[in-house]
Image (tube, rainbow, N blue to C red):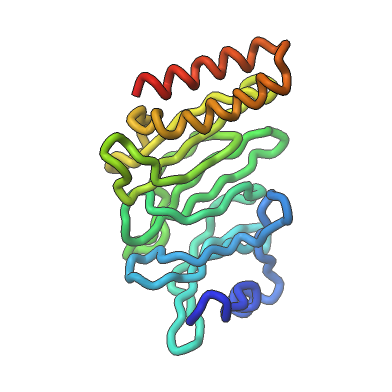
Amino acid sequence: MSLSSIDFLSVVRSCIPEEAEIVVLKQEGDPAAILYADVDGDGFPEITALYRYLDHQYLFSLKEYSGNWFPIGSASTGRNLAVKDFAAAPISRKEGWDVLIGWERAEEPIAELDIIQWTQNGFQRVIPPGTTYSHLEIEDMPTRNGQDGLCEIALWTQEQGQAYRVETFRWDPFRLVPTSDVHAYYFQKVARYYENLTQEQPNEPLYRSYLEDAQKRVGSS
């Protein structure tokens, strides 16, 4: 089945309770929380979505068989927060992508990261609570040896004004760990961000200090 032939909203609505609502992300354009990616590792993409029903939010996946869609897994998220980010990527394994959810904390300018993996026992969280960020980027970042087919995560956390603390992470069995061997690549992007800020606000020393730190990280890895 081709991607263009799938009416994702209609498929998801047909598989959830009539009174349920598909979760809408807190992003420009209000996109629906729907993904199309292989989360169970069988080589074929599933539809994975979030919906709200009776004050609970649920994560579920649908698989297509002979032109029809059937649920293969569903679980309550245990959260009733707004959703900032919803993505799928090969974080912990190359086959069977992880689902990443950014839960927006009420009245706070940060989100909390959840990474959820499909297993034989259904969906399971693979990181403990407490990983927070303001902006999230997911990419297979190259080291000196190139890319490895697994994605790293960059977390930008707002500190002052438009200044962010930026850290990169990768999966080390059973947990996310900070990694510096992608700094030469990724912090070029961070440096460009602060170069633009220093040009726009040349009398603001704060951004120049963040620029210098980013440039050091590019050169030290």
Could you say which quadrant of the image residue 14 lies in?
bottom right
| Residue at the front extreme of this rendering | 199
Q: How many marks?
A: 0
Residue 203 place in picture, x, y as percent = 72, 11
Q: Residue at x 66, y 49 (%)?
A: 82
Residue in the foreground of this view, choosing between 16 and 5:
5
- Asked if residue 173 lies left or right of residue 29, the reply is left
Q: Residue at x 51, y 70 (%)?
A: 47
Using the image, determine if residue 61 lies above or below residue 118.
below
Residue 17 place in picture, x, y as percent = 64, 74
Whether residue 50 is visible, yes or no, is yes
Residue 70 place in picture, x, y as percent = 48, 80
- Asked if residue 76 lies left or right of residue 65, the reply is right
Q: Quadrant of the C terminus?
A: top left
- Asked if residue 221 lies left or right of residue 36, the reply is left
| Residue at the bottom extreme of this rendering | 66
Q: Residue at x 56, y 53 (%)?
A: 86
Using the image, determine if residue 200 lies above or below residue 80.
above
- Asked if residue 74 lies left or right of residue 145, the reply is right
Residue 161 place in picture, x, y as percent = 70, 22
Whether residue 16 is visible, yes or no, is no
Using the image, determine if residue 166 lies above or below residue 102.
above
Q: Residue at x 71, y 72 (%)?
A: 19
